[in-house]
Amino acid sequence: MIDERELIEFVTTQRWFGSKTRDVAHSTVVDRALLRSEPRLELLLVEIRFDTGTHETYQLLADDGGLDAIADPRQVRELVHLARTNTKLPAGDGIVEFASTEAFSGAGLELREARPVGAEQSNSSVVFDEELIMKVFRRLEAGINPELELLRFLTEHGFENIAQLAGWYAYAGRQMDATLGILQQFIPGGEDGWERSLATMGGEPEHFLDSLHRLGEVTGRMHAILGSDSSDPAFAPEDTSVESLGLLTATVDEEIESIFMDLPDDNAELEPIRGRGEEVRERLRLLTNLGGAGQVIRHHGDFHLGQTLWAEGDWVILDFEGEPARSLPERRRKRSPLRDVAGMLRSFAYAASASPILRGVDPPVAWEERARAEFLDGYRQTVDMHLVPSGASMDKLLRVFELEKAVYELRYELNNRPDWVAIPVAGIVRMLEEEVPV
């Protein structure tokens, strides 16, 4: 029997616990599955209940040594073995099911070396033999995780610019149905796209800028594949309705109104946009006067340079979970693929602005403009043009999503990095000064 106080103390002090500012009232193990009897290894679903009456569910592994065996790569190796053998185990009234893809199923190679990935905040990952990586989802939500869903779809449809899916495990029971973890190919020697942009800023920026045309092509092909299967209801592209476009406009409009009403008075970096909330909202209304909006599909959902790797002369796209602050149903919602494009364009703006802060290096003249042009040219050449509007309508809708992203960034920086507020402010000012495409 696990002591409740010990459970609360352990979970609430972990970096992957997402509600550190909230008061915890109770905690309990709501379900468990015995993964191995000797030595004992048990999977626990732990409910953390807050004083407001709401709750969150977290995943732990317990062994004879303590509460969280996920910190021990030797124990996570057991999860890989269970996935490899497509094992099903009872969990109370439910079941924990391990599964592998066809390419990985039945493989009998022994895993020798294992190392934890230390930089993560919300999940826990272990790399095996520099060939496989197991990502364990800590906070669980009801439903299939978008990362599993999109990786499985892209792997099955032959998209090569991802870390290919090898397996996964999931829980189905009275508490919820939830994805617990995924196993995928590990890309050794890959260079993080964000770090690569900063590292080349003051030395050889052409190598990075030239590669962005290829990143645009890879992104366009990813979207084309994600919108290619009309037989799968979860992925079938859908025409954009007047109602969905109105909902988008209303959501962004509400966010603009909310944040501009509460701009703090003591930050001089906000002066260029102070008192201009109505002007920003009017710009939104002009931009949403579209001739057509294309289609909505499943998309990456949190696309930026930090979600890419440059490996062996090509780009690999990572982390399909979507924006962590959004609920799972929101992250699974079909949206315009241009939302991903806008996220990457805003990432270029961040790289150009962050280089002097982080590296003491000013970007070359017109670096951001060149980055945008290369990426968009590659994207337009490969995306299925049925998915996106053409001409001025595409430019307008792209600016809508850039505005949405910049306003989201403004709120984030005000709450987390006030010294970086100037970056989204500059993006908003630029969009106000640009001519609206006709």
Image: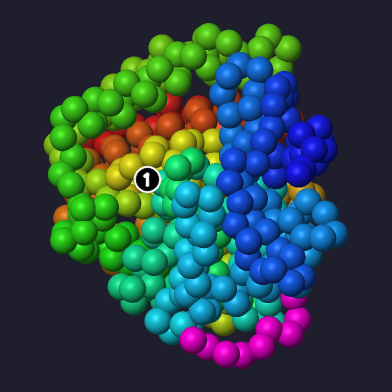
Magenta segment includes 401: no
Q: Mark 1 points at which residue?
A: 332
Query: The N terminus is located in which quarter?
Result: top right
SS class of the residue under badge 1? loop
> Predominant secondary structure in magenta?
loop
Can I make out residue 271 in this image? no
Query: The C terminus is located in which quarter?
Result: top left
Query: Residue 164 at x, y = what percent?
Result: 47, 74
> Closest to the observer: 318 or 380?
318
Query: Residue 129 at x, y = what percent?
Result: 69, 82
Residue lying at 68% horizontally and 73% vertically, measured from the top left: 77
Image position of 332 (left or right of 67):
left
Magenta segment includes 108: yes
Query: Residue 303 at x, y = what percent?
Result: 48, 51
Image position of 251 (left or right of 9):
left
Indicate whether 271 appears above or below 59: above
> Closest to the observer: 15 or 308?
15
Task: Give the number of callouts.
Answer: 1
Q: How is the rendered protein coloured?
A: rainbow
* Quarter of the view holding residue 267: top right
- Residue bounds of the magenta highlight: 106-116
Indicate whether 49 appears above or below 141: above
Residue lying at 46% horizontally and 71% vertically, measured from the top left: 99
Residue lying at 63% horizontally and 61% vertically, measured from the top left: 34
Can I make out residue 322 in this image? yes
Residue lying at 26% horizontally and 55% vertically, measured from the top left: 235
* Residue sitting farthest toward the right: 65
* Quarter of the view holding residue 133: bottom right
Q: Give neighbour class at mark 1: few <14, some 14-19, many 20+ (Cα, 10 Å).
A: many
Query: Residue 125 at x, y = what percent?
Result: 67, 62
Type of the residue with mark 1: Arg
